[in-house]
Image: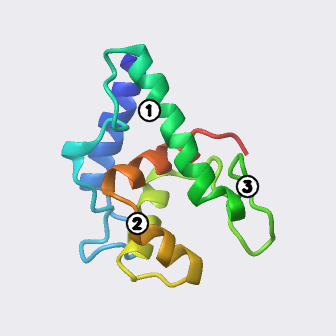
Amino acid sequence: MMQTKLSVLLLVITCCFSSISLAASPSGSCPVDHRHMGHGVSNDDPADADNGQTAIKQLAETRCAACHGQQGISIADDIPNLAGQQPLYLCAALEAYRRQLRHAAPMNELAAGLSDVDIINLSEYYAHLHH
């Protein structure tokens, strides 16, 4: 539980202060509203954490798995693997697709329906999968 809180805090700090080469926003960093971080679940109740992880996995399965695979390993050579990717990169990429700063037909449409919390959760979920 403490490790989860620390990893979320680290992601908040990274998203707020780090810049990356991918131009996901005018400032070049992942534009995440950090007040909503925490995987959308309470870390105080293990049942809430389990339900939150189930919801994140379902989101990944419904939005991402058809192309990027059930475990984040893509089904085709021209589709990137998501498993083990850096969470800041995933966050920035999803935000860029959502804002139409990066273009790929299915990604723009799928990312348009994601909230900040969804982007954070998916980024963390795939970052923790092994490739």
Q: Compared with residue 35, is residue 46 higher up or lower down, i.e. above or below?
A: above
Tell me which colouring the rendered structure shows.
Answer: rainbow
Query: Residue drawn 45% across and 68% down?
Result: 111
Distance of label 1 from label 3 (alpha carbons): 21 Å
The residue beneath circle 3 is 69
Secondary structure of the residue carrying tag 2 is loop
Is residue 38 toward the left or the right of residue 113 in the image? left
Query: Residue drawn 74% across and 54% down?
Result: 73
- At label 1, the amino acid type is Gly
Q: Quadrant of residue 65?
A: bottom right
Q: Quadrant of residue 49?
A: top left
Q: Compared with residue 22, is residue 115 higher up or lower down, i.e. above or below?
A: above
Mark 2 or 3, nearer chain start: 3
Distance of label 2 from label 3 (alpha carbons): 20 Å
The residue beneath circle 2 is 113
Is residue 17 toward the left or the right of residue 65 in the image? left
The residue beneath circle 1 is 52
